[in-house]
Image (cartoon, grey):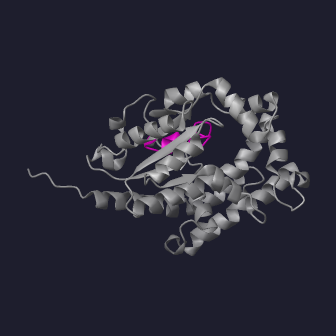
Amino acid sequence: MTNKTVDPVDLCELRIERRRAQLQRDWEEAREYVSRKNRWTPLFAVAGMAALGAGLSRITPGSTAHAAASFWATGSKPRSKRDRKRVPGATTESSTTPVAAAGRSCMKRIALTGGIATGKSVVSAEFERLGVPTVDADVIAREAVAPGTPALAAILARFGAEILDEQQVLDRRKLGAIVFADEASRRDLERIVHPAVQAAINTWLVAAERDGHRLAIAVIPLLYETGRERDFDLVITTACAGDEQLRRVMARDGLTELQARQRIAAQLSTEEKVRRANYAIWTDGAIERTKKQVLETLERLARPN
């Protein structure tokens, strides 16, 4: 019997079309989903349902409507056991993406995570300088809560107008003082912001794959805390010593030691992230050393599966 050659381009297109088909199937499920969520969800529901009803082929990639539509299909639906991330510590060769299983290469979806002030911005900038497209969840989150957005309206409904500054823009310092001192408040904020951010990243990844990139990196600080590691083929984490992380947070954000420790404690520990990730880049030393690690990691990522 003759073995047929599998075209990697066809496989990539198949993966994209399957995601599009899932969006269509979730159109009806979205209605029921709204009724099960908390009181802020309907603010996202209107844009999401309208986008799906308008026809996915006409939605502009990166638009608010497209991001909202993607949320209904991928934001909170549980994955099957077959799609879940492999066990921590697995090697890069154990990737279970459809293309890797077929023995051909397609775009690797890579998450870059790490605790606060552990060097994510430096590392992601170096990857981008080396030609790898990147998207930053923090940047998207800032755009998601801009004046006039549904997310900001939901935040005001939950926390009150006193978290706005004189220009009626979200005062992140005021909000941070609230949510990092109270876990319930932090969870409420995450329920409002994370779906929009996740949807925008999903949309960006699909576009990057269609553009023919072999690698794409999404910078997601709360990757493990939100369970998003299952959405990626590989995970890179940045890391540094605890005392250095504390010093950086205090110096960068002008916080007291107590405030800095609260922010660090709100995330998974660096040790646990290093244990779970496929790669760790340590940023304690000179910038040249960090850049060297980025290059070495990229060389490993670029190898065929």
Query: Which quarter of the picture shows residue 250?
Result: top right
**Residue nearest the observer in this picture, 268 or 244:** 244
Query: Which quarter of the picture shows residue 81?
Result: top left
Using residue 179 as the reference point, say whether residue 201 is left or right of it: left
What is the span of residues highlighted in magenta in the rendered image? 221-234
Using residue 251 as the reference point, say whether residue 159 is left or right of it: right
Q: Tell me what residue is drawn at x 71 percent, y 47 percent.
A: 191
Q: Which quadrant, please, contains the C terminus?
A: top left
- Percent position of residue 288, x then y: 49, 38
**Residue nearest the observer in this picture, 172 or 150:** 172
**Is residue 227 covered in magenta?**
yes
**Is residue 248 covered in magenta?**
no
Q: Tell me what residue is drawn at x 56 percent, y 26 percent.
A: 272
- Percent position of residue 277, x then y: 48, 33
Q: Is residue 149 above or below residue 280?
A: below
- Percent position of residue 162, x then y: 91, 52
**Residue 259 in sight from this viewpoint:** yes
Query: Which quarter of the picture shows residue 249?
Result: top right
**Residue 266 in sight from this viewpoint:** no
Q: Main secondary structure of the magenta part?
A: loop
Q: Tell me what residue is drawn at x 52 percent, y 59 percent.
A: 204
- Percent position of residue 211, x then y: 41, 64
Q: Is residue 284 above or below residue 107?
A: above
